[in-house]
Image (cartoon, rainbow, N blue to C red):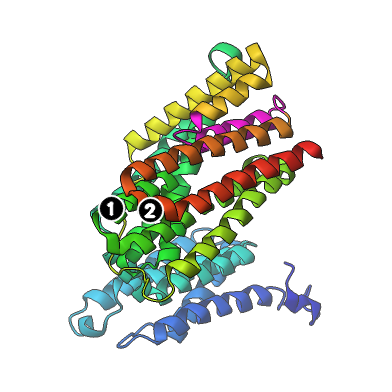
Amino acid sequence: MNHWFTGIFSIEGTVFASLPAFITSLGIGLLLGIERERKKNIRAGIRTFALTSLLGTLSGLLAENNLPLFPIATLFTVAAFILTAYWHPAARKDAPDATTQIALLVAYCLGLLVWHGLAALAVALAILSTLLLYLKPELSGLSHRLSRQDILALLQFGVVSAIILPVLPDRPLGPFGAINLYETWLMVVLISGVGLLGYLAVRMLGERLGGPLLGLLGGLVSSTATSLAFAREARSDPNTLPLSTMVIQLANLVIFVRIAVLAALLAPGMVSPLLIVLGCALVAGMVMTWLSSRSLFSGHHRPAEGAAVDPKNPVEMGTALLFGGLYAGVTFAASALTSLFGHTGFFGVALISGLTDVDAISLTAFNQFTAGKLPALTVTTAIALALLSNTLFKFSMIASLGGKDLVRRCAPMFAATSLGLVLGLIVVWQL
């Protein structure tokens, strides 16, 4: 058994050859025991946990010396001692709580793992277990902040990712071999997961969110939904106009970062040209947002308090099925039109699908590039066209819902990002 201890002391071939395993086990027990010792009226502390972990390692040793059932018998014995301490009338008041009881059993099993050569795994599990024990106030507060809707979102994501995805066939289907059900649903899981992170953050932080953070998280959930929600907010309450402007601007800047991250995950080979286009749009939009924010919040122009966003669950089955159908439709159209009309057909799909959703065409383009069906330049151009059409769509919706004042404040940022996309494309085509 390799261990740092053997590099210092020559114990191989002696009766102390197994000592490193017991030292590791002792450390695990001390780690768990220190956390438990901090609790009031705890009868199982440092010594109990250290001894329990050592007992697990000792059981493994004895099991290899003609006592194969010893670990199981010892485990039941430890469990019996714990139950006796819990149910005995004289000790019930100060008996270990259920968490401490389970932690003692975990300590025993981790000690057993150490003996079987899984010391690194045992130490990692001990650290994670100690974190769970130590972070009780934070975890308890988190559970109380989650609403029924939030828990439903988590459960639905579990259904989408852990139940539906594994049973789908992973092979091309349909005309042009364009539809892969596993790949399609994997994209649903990816986009739902990103949206879920932003959704939970908005739900948990609620009204404590400031304008910048609200815009960033809103962009993760949906830049389109966030823009429309705050356009209505600005029209219904003119006092929220500065805040609504900031949120809309930042939500529509996050989309460039979001696509860059998706590219790095799904098609790292085309990140370089895409970053040029996305970077130009992002920098131009950030500069314009910064310039406009200085004038918006100078003097008496302050963001109104109390503006809130009520995001929709991004993982509900209707939303997941809608995005899955949209992605499958875009993938099929892209394959068919590319086969019939070349790259020009794919550009047409990008312009049309980008009006309502950029994720579907972006994911389709990345997968087409990874499969060797489209070059990086075509994919970059298609995504830029989709972003341009999406920008036009969102700006027109903001204009119709938010009123002239909001349009005047948001127009420079939208114009700057559109110009940045065009300039970035020119640079990429020249390279």
Contact (CB < 8 A) between labels 1 and 2? yes
Q: Nearer the viewer, residue 193 or 19?
A: 193
What's the residue at 58%, 22% (across, down)? 334
Which quarter of the figure is the C terminus placed in? Answer: top right
**Residue 269 visible in the picture:** no
Is 224 rendered above or below residue 408? above
Crowding around mark 2 (Cα neighbors within 10 Å: few <14, some 14 to 19, many 20+) is many
**Residue 355 sits inside the magenta stretch:** yes
Q: Nearer the viewer, residue 87 or 68?
A: 87
Label 1: which residue?
A: 235
On the image, the x and y values in percent for residue 413 come to 52, 53
Magenta span of residues: 353-374
**Residue 148 visible in the picture:** yes
What's the residue at 52%, 82% (across, down)? 30
**Residue 390 sits inside the magenta stretch:** no
On the image, the x and y values in percent for residue 367 come to 62, 32
Which quarter of the figure is the N terminus placed in? Answer: bottom right
Q: Can you tell which quarter of the image residue 16 is in? A: bottom right
Identify the disc placed on residue 406: 2
What's the residue at 33%, 36% (across, down)? 317
> Mark 1 or 2 closer to N-term?
1
Q: Nearer the viewer, residue 376 or 164?
A: 376
Amino acid at circle 1: Arg
Q: Nearer the viewer, residue 343 or 64?
A: 343
What's the residue at 74%, 68% (across, down)? 2
